[in-house]
Amino acid sequence: MPCPYRGNILNEPKAYRFTVSTEKRGCTPLVCKALSFTSLTMAQTAEELFSSGIERYSNGEPVGDLIPLFKSLCDRAPKSSPAWTCLSWLYLIDSKPELALKAASRAVKLNPQDPQARINLSMAMIETGKKGVRDHIEAAQQLVTISEELKTDVEESIADGFKRKPDWKSLKKVQDWVFE
């Protein structure tokens, strides 16, 4: 899926992680242990949900079945750019550009350095007739130019998009613009 995050979805800045600090709270050891276990369980659950979604997508599960999973993930981890990027991609494949626009906008706001989020936003803007695509295309161009890994990830995502939607006009436009 065009959210090829090699790490976990919680590899966001520390402020975004599901953790509960028990230091200096005057907790009893049992309460501290329970708080730590609860936050750890929440983090594992979000990551497991993300991994499960990526695996199911990779195995060819219909995107309509995966959208609720990623919506749930975005509700659980609202500051996870990878989750919003994946949700926007699923909406784009499912021909729901208005919803894709909202999800991609959120992904870019959370992580403006993610070229896939910029590409998803550009495609959603094209499909909804919004202006301002050029800024996102230029940002994506710069990002794929400075990192061979990001470039490869984006190329793989685009190839995946054409496998799922062979005549995808907005994807073709964005591909041509980003890699011109």
Image: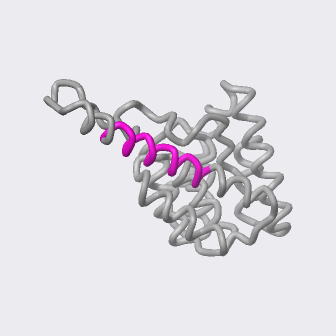
Spot occupied by residue 176 in the image (x, y as percentages of width and height):
77, 49
Which of the 4 image quadrants contains residue 37?
top left
Instruction: Tell me, yes or no, if residue 19 can be seen here.
Output: yes
Residue in front for this viewpoint, 40 or 55: 40
Q: Is residue 47 magenta?
A: yes
The residue at the far left in this view is 26
Image quadrant in which the C terminus is located? top right
Residue at point 69%, 68% (across, down): 93
Q: Is residue 48 left or right of residue 18?
A: right
Residue in front for this viewpoint, 81 or 45: 45
Instruction: Tell me, yes or no, if residue 16 can be seen here.
Output: no
Residue at point 47%, 46% (across, down): 80
Q: Is residue 9 left or right of residue 28?
A: right
Residue in front for this viewpoint, 89 or 75: 75
Q: Is residue 52 above or below residue 130?
A: above
Q: How is the image coloured?
A: one colour
Residue at point 56%, 70% (across, down): 68
The residue at the far front in this view is 30
Residue at point 68%, 26% (across, down): 147
Magenta stretch, main secondary structure class: helix
Spot occupied by residue 53 in the image (x, y as percentages of width and height):
65, 57
Residue in front for this viewpoint, 92 or 75: 75
Span highlighted in magenta in the image? 35-50
Spot occupied by residue 161 in the image (x, y as percentages of width and height):
77, 59
